[in-house]
Image (spheres, grey):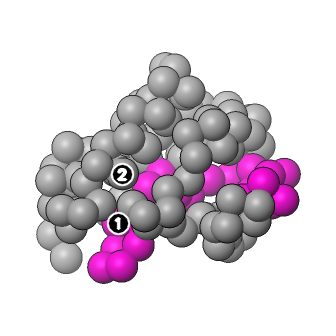
Amino acid sequence: MTKIADHDAYIAAAPEPFQPSLKRLRALLARVLPGAEEVVAYNMPGFKLGGSVVAGYAAFSKQCGLYLHPSAISELAEEIAAAGLKATKTGITFSPRKPIPDDLVERLARASRKGAGA
């Protein structure tokens, strides 16, 4: 896999159907995490505050993922399930047909920031 230099390059290299979802996530996360540095960690775009990556996103062949501090996922687990989304300890998968609601992304990002102590 080619090393990705920045968020723009990552989104451009993602499968075309996922690009609008990734652009939306990037904009939401940048707005909700003011002062965060855009980074690429583990070949995935993320937002770093106080030395910690507090949110990241990725595209795969059939879905996208939003990755956060584990405490954010556990804190909002009921809302994630109510939205019909699947979650792991640190991530939520979604598709363009079933995106994560913007208000839930915002709450998750804030909870992730708090959980990371950033």
Residue contact between numbered discs 2 and 1, judged by CB atoms under 8 Å? yes
- Residue at the far top: name it: 35
Is 64 included in the stretch rendered in magenta? Answer: yes
The foreground one among 53 and 22 is: 22
- Identity of the amino acid at label 2? Ser
Q: Which is nearer the N-term, disc 2 or disc 1?
A: 2
Could you tell me which residue is drawn at 51 percent across and 20 percent down?
34
Can residue 59 be seen here? The reply is yes
- Rendered position, 72 above or below 85: above
Q: Is residue 13 left or right of residue 41?
A: left
Residue 46 location (% of width, % of height): 43, 47
Residue designated by label 2: 21
Q: Quadrant of the N terminus?
A: bottom left
Q: Is residue 51 left or right of residue 71?
A: left
Range of magenta residues: 56-80
Instruction: Say the numbered circle drawn on residue 59.
Output: 1
2 vs 1, front mark = 2
Could you tell me which residue is drawn at 54 percent across and 68 percent down?
93
Could you tell me which residue is drawn at 65 percent across and 72 percent down?
86
